Image: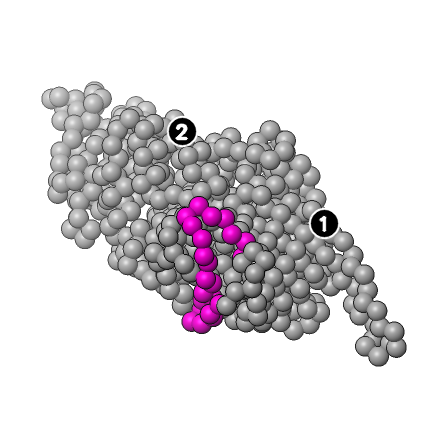
Amino acid sequence: MRAFIAGCCLLLATPLGAQQKAFDVTDYNLSLTLPEAGKTIEGLALLTVRRVARADTLVLDLLDMQVSRIRVGAHEVTFRQGEGHVYVPLAGAVGDTLAVSVAYRGAPTDGLIIGTDSAGRWMAFGDNWPNRARHWIPSVDHPSDKATVTWVVNAPSSLRVVANGQLLEETPLPQPRDPDGSAGRPMPRTLTRWRESRPIAVYLMVIAAAPLARYELGPTACGYAEIGGCVPQSVYVAPEQRAILPGDFARAGDIVTFYAQRVGPFGYEKLAHLQSSTRFGGMENASAIFYADEIFRRRGVSTELIAHETAHQWFGDLVTEREWPHVWLSEGFATYFAAVYVGHAFGDSALVGEMRRTRVQLLASKVVGSRPVIDTAQTDLLALLNENSYQKGGWVLHMLRGLVGDSAFYGGVRDYVVAHRHGTALTADLQSAVEARAKRPLGWFFDQWLRRPGFASLTTTWQYDAATARVTLDVAQGDRFGTYRVPLTVAVTDAGGIVHRATVDVPAAKSGRFVLPMAFRAAPRALVVDPDVQLLAELRTP
């Protein structure tokens, strides 16, 4: 996700209880019938459920929808619905796999966004993050529970249906008979079936149903796909927007290749980019990224936004944060890797410029100054989408890369993705992977940057000693957020105009004095602190 487009409501973090952890939903088969007008949908959800611990009740999250029938296997069961949940009795033993079907109907108020576009055309788009899928999908609506999904959508033939995974079927349905003509001529309908064969979080399970025009980008990133030889990519837009394509989507193949080379193969059957209804600037649904309608209509989708949402296909989708406070593993990675791609596409100065810009933003941020990145106290999930999760999370990765070097950083990230591919992870998993590559403990780094608010504040002065031909640095740390342990790079311009770089290890202390390792025959012309923009700090050089 890149930014909010619409206002948001309060959603509370609801940890899975002991009863719920007893069941693992491994697959969803979701059949939906969409209307020609209005907002009422009909659904049949077939869940494959594995019992992993002793419990007698499966608790599904569901709002807005009224359940009419539940079957376990071939047998109808008595269930209870209330307070946003459906309670399903399940007999059996640990290790059993059960088929639970839920028939339901209703008008979703969120999650599936139903409305009309500027031309008055009916449309519907899934928009589930963080836990809004429960408004239209009976599910375990938590990122720790990933599953495969099949979509079977009965919709008016005027709509194109796009969903996660691979398109398996688009079949026109027989017209219902009306012998006396009293009902009028019914609208033709089409059955569309998509299958996502890799497990994804429920918040990533979506459909789009709208009068969309398709632009094929063709096979991309050949040799870098987990499924098949290439990654098929396409763009779906309102018909009147097709003429602007491909625009920056011309880089979509290079973006996937760039990430795959550094992180690992692209994990899904295809990658679609869709003009949609979403409260975010972009939403990283697995294999089907949704971008806000107004971005297409007002200014076009930028390379940075495409790169951000595409990076999520690895970070957030392929490897999903197991618990909400660790959402920086999704948003921080996407923010930083988008900046790294922009540097690759437009030159290193573009990356440096982005890091300088976001540093200014972070130094002025109230949330950065008051809350940690891993914010276990925050119960409003949408409030986690802030400068901590995005820009500061990206800065943590930037500093980690500078600390351990490219080889250990990218090697550790690759190991992290391999170990948790199609699964979930926490911050400790990333730390362990990078520590193994760097061959040193990094707990101090993760603790000071992720588990406490704020940033470093350094005041640096220097002097030249002609007797020793050395430059001495004095570094003092401010009181606002306490002391930080940081590597500090300086660039010294000597009397002849040649620039020399040196890095000193500043301890978590109020002050320190450091002698630079190089000798100067005369007093240097200038000294610049952090010339490459590698440190998230308030820097003063009086």
Residue 294's image quarter?
A: bottom right
**Quarter of the image containing the C terminus?**
top left
If you read the primary sequence from the N terminus, does the residue marked by circle 2 or circle 1 appear first? 1
Residue 212 higher or lower than 437, as above or below: below
Of badges 2 and 1, the one in the foreground is: 1
Q: Position of residue 170 (x, y in %)?
A: 74, 52
Name the residue carrying label 1: 169
- Magenta span of residues: 79-100
CA–CA distance between discs 2 and 1?
40 Å
Q: Is residue 106 visible?
A: yes
Name the residue carrying label 2: 411
Three-letter code for the amino acid on which mark 1 is drawn: Glu
Q: Secondary structure at mark 1?
A: strand
Q: Is residue 363 visible?
A: no
Residue 412 higher or lower than 483, as above or below: above
- The residue nearer to you, when weighing 504 against 526, is 504
Task: Decide: few, some or many residues near mark 2? Use Cα within 10 Å; few <14, some 14-19, many ≥20.
Answer: some
Direction from residue 229 to residue 501 in the image, left or right: left
